[in-house]
Image: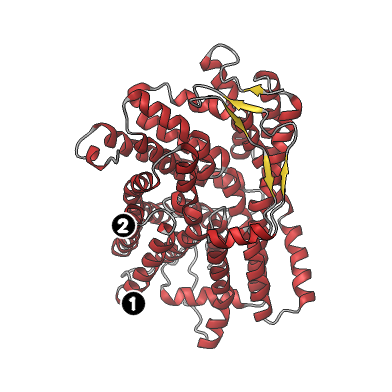
Amino acid sequence: MIWQQNYDPFNNMLLSTAVASIPVIVMLVGLGFLHLKAHIAAACGLAAALLIAIIGFGMPTEMAAKAAFLGGLTGLMPIGWIVLNIIFLHQLTEQNGSFKILQDSIAGITRDRRLQLLLIAFAFGAFFEGAAGFGTPVAVTAAILIGLGFSPLAASGLTLIANTAPVAFGALGTPVITLAKVHGYDLMKVSAMIGTQLSFFALLVPFWLVWAFAGRKGMMQVWPAILVTGVSFAIPEYLVSNYMGPELVGVIAAMVSMTCLVLFLRVWQPKEVWTSVSLKGRNEEAGQTQDAGPPTRHPTADVVRAWLPWVILTVFVFIWGLPSVKGFFNSLFAPQFTIDGLHQMVEKVAPAVAKPTKEGAVYIFGLLSATGTGILLSALVGGLSMKYSFGQLLAAYGRTIWLVRYSLMTIVLMLGLGTLTRYSGLDTTLGLAFATTGVFYPFFGTLMGWLGVALTGSDTASNVLFGGMQKVAADQLGLSPNLMGAANSSGGVMGKMIDAQSIVVASTATRWFNHEGDILRYVFFHSIALACLVGIMVTLQAYTWPFTSMVIH
């Protein structure tokens, strides 16, 4: 029997919206204010979602349970698989001492912590976002920053702030390609519109990142390097997204930005070298302000060996991100499991969609094509290059599984919550509340994208969730559908820093377990403030010249 979603079960949209928000509120309050451990807060949120979906929104109990189960499977593969294997590689490099040599070599480029943030968190992280996405950049760069001596809160929070502007074109353009394919947007037009919007934020985010770490005065001391980083990212992002398409936007922009920053730092360094490893003005339990001292110089051969595992990782991640490679591996092994009792049994209806649409529920076990598999193979190859035996590698892997066990559990529970809200229609109810804002819709429609990523942890999933609704609302209000489709993705990237799975990945990479609430409280202001700025920009593009001339119809 097909079950149709009901977006206003209480015949009062205000009340229905309030009830639909309860699971998210339960999880965020438990995590951010009650200081519950992340897996406990996630379990409470999931339990609340099950009760609200079944009792409040009338979803059959079996369907609700199966939706949560499907989300849990997705949490393990691909998200948890990435986290497990990147931490495994980090463990190997730490244990043999090569990670210390790597951090010294980075400090050799610049000892200034603000510039290290630009190089690692923003530019290097953007490369991994563009090539792989799905938590990879947060896991890699947070681990490197903690190794460089940054405090856990600084390493976690700043990595999340940095991983914003590149997200819309992450994983070789997957969010944009999905938006166009699923909802019928013109791929090049919506790619160009997103690139136009985010080019401004590619300039802004590096300044925001350093300000969040060092304060206004500390930021102004290194503004030339920040400007070089932002401009050298924004220009390629605009050009590639407008004239080549979405696939290589992140990769090309990140490589240009890294190259320009490194070359610039050869001829320019700030007068005052900032060696703080904690956030400006904070006494953190995670680590006090300290001078890390001058870096140790190592023989070139040792530096090359220290970087080799990470070079191998970069190559493997890029190869695994190529659509042709994914397609090849999926042709070899990618069994599909239909979730009977849920597949094609849930129907989305108006006003969320133009015509009734059945929701599929198929889990694809793409083990070979998963980014985490590429990371695992790179870790094994890197481990062998570091002279580990197979027995030592196996023992280290077992220790890593034990180390991240609660993080994996949290990701499973949180993805279960996010998937259940999608199939039950709770997220659509929240989205429809934004869609009733009339002339203010460009602003609140942008925040709808932010909400989608905050709930699902994925700009791709948010585009699937709300991309159609954005198109319908834009047509009704006389706005450009391309503008609002792009706004969904551009606003969504600012929700990436507060989505639960990203926070868990960051806390795991920095080994700051059970402090997910501290990370959430730190990044929440930055997330909502940047999302509002995107909303203001979209509103200007909708109504105000000369911004209206940027809109691609």
Which residue of the protein is positioned furthest toward the front in this rendering? 331
393 in relation to 244, above or below: below
Residue 401 on image: x %, y %:
74, 59
**Looking at the figure, which quarter contains the N terminus?**
top right
Secondary structure at badge 1 equals: helix
375 in relation to 548, above or below: below
Image position of 104 (left or right of 274):
right
Q: Type of residue at label 2? A: Leu
Image position of 460 (left or right of 268):
right
Tag on residue 504? none
* Closer to us: 291 or 247: 247
Characterize the local packing of mark 1: few (<14), some (14-19) or many (20 or more) Cα atoms within 10 angstroms. Answer: few
How far apart are labels 1 and 2 at the CA level?
27 Å
The mark lying in front, picked from 1 and 2, is 2
Residue ID for mark 2 = 239
Residue 280 on image: x %, y %:
44, 54
